[in-house]
Image: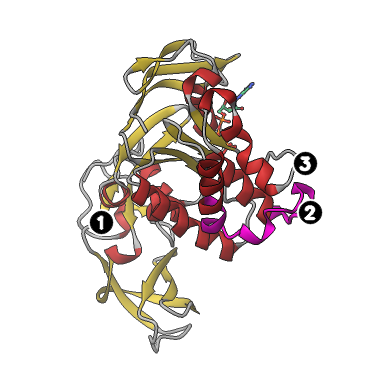
Amino acid sequence: MAEVTLQNVSRHYGSTAALDGVSLTVPDGAFVVLLGPTGAGKTSCLRMVAGLDRPDQGRVLIGGQDVTEASPAARNVAMVFQQYSLYAHLTVRQNLEFSLKAPGLKLGAAEITARVSRVAEVLQISHKLNNRATQLSGGEMQRVSIGRALVRDPAIYLMDEPLSSLDAKLRADLRIELKAIQAQSGATLLYVTHDQIEAMTMATHVGILDHGRLVQFGPPREIYEAPVSLYAASRLGQPRINLLPAALFPGAPARAKTIGLRPEQIFQGEGEEGQVQRVEHLGDQTRLHLSYRGESLITVTDAHSPLRAGDSLRIRPQNPFYFDADGARII
Ligand SMILES: Nc1ncnc2c1ncn2[C@@H]1O[C@H](COP(=O)(O)OP(=O)(O)OP(=O)(O)O)[C@@H](O)[C@H]1O
């Protein structure tokens, strides 16, 4: 595994800047998740590292080597795409073995079998090893695609929304498995997702992209607790951060346009009165939809809360975020 660095990388398509001066280091052994809405530049970032695309400006380094001009094959990266890409006429075992049988690798048969068995077990596809790829469900095919990357020993794994086509249960299982594989093996991963739960649970570092620019990079907890902007604050958190006019509550700083309140930044039982609009019992927590001075807010309370729609509840901000008119964080 190796450290991967983008140095001031830009890539334009016509007048669109897919990447705009991105500098980013994926430390050796890190699990870096890129977050951002559609079009933010996440896939472009992966393609630069994979060598599927070249920057107009800037450099890409893998393990300290400048690979900006190197072919994908020369970079020793393993990529998993959103859509599975398998050899349909081969069995699952043959698909998994394929890259390990490259003549340059010189791996023994026993080593190949051992790697395939281990990965098949982790991905719960051992019983399908002799099936043809076409005899699998969509979820199984995607697990084989992930397996094809995991059997290898690349400098870095590049994954583009690999779990997005799977059902919720399998996604949750694989989230835990991928994180465990990474933690145990020290693998280096650059991983693209829309799913902030994947980011919060798996990432050692999160990179937030906005129109091709990297606007914040750090551990997910740090970005959650100290976002640099309204945009970065909105990318993490479930339920989403409440963004309201700053003047709604007393005490806003002069330049503040927006107050940002995550559920835990709304103190209940003190302050001004709001109304409970709706109560959602989710099992481990209860979500409260409140109306407060004509605005809607969502917060959480304990699982056994007796609150009901129509009740009044006093609330006040507790260590809120304030943002200026451009969305930059003030405090
Ligand atoms: N080959 C291309 N030709 C033209 N425009 C492109 C090309 N590749 C990317 N773009 C543009 O560059 C921008 C960034 O695209 P990119 O695919 O990196 O975004 P993304 O964050 O991965 O989005 P998504 O979540 O939808 O995959 C978009 O505006 C996209 O339309």
Write down the region rendered in magenta.
Answer: 119-138
Disc 1 designates what residue? 320
Q: Quadrant of residue 230?
A: top left
Residue 312 in percent (x, y) is at 37, 82
Residue 293 in percent (x, y) is at 39, 66
Disc 1 element? loop
Disc 2 element? helix
Amino acid type at mark 3: Ala
| Marking on residue 88 | 3
Amino acid type at mark 2: Gln
Residue 327 in percent (x, y) is at 35, 39
Query: In the image, is residue 136 part of the stretch drawn in magenta?
Result: yes
The disc, 2 or 3, on the residue closer to the chain's N-terminal end is 3
Q: Can you tell which of label 2 and label 1 is closer to the viewer?
A: 2
Q: How is the image coloured?
A: secondary structure
Label 2 – label 1 distance at C-alpha: 53 Å
Q: Quadrant of residue 213?
A: top left
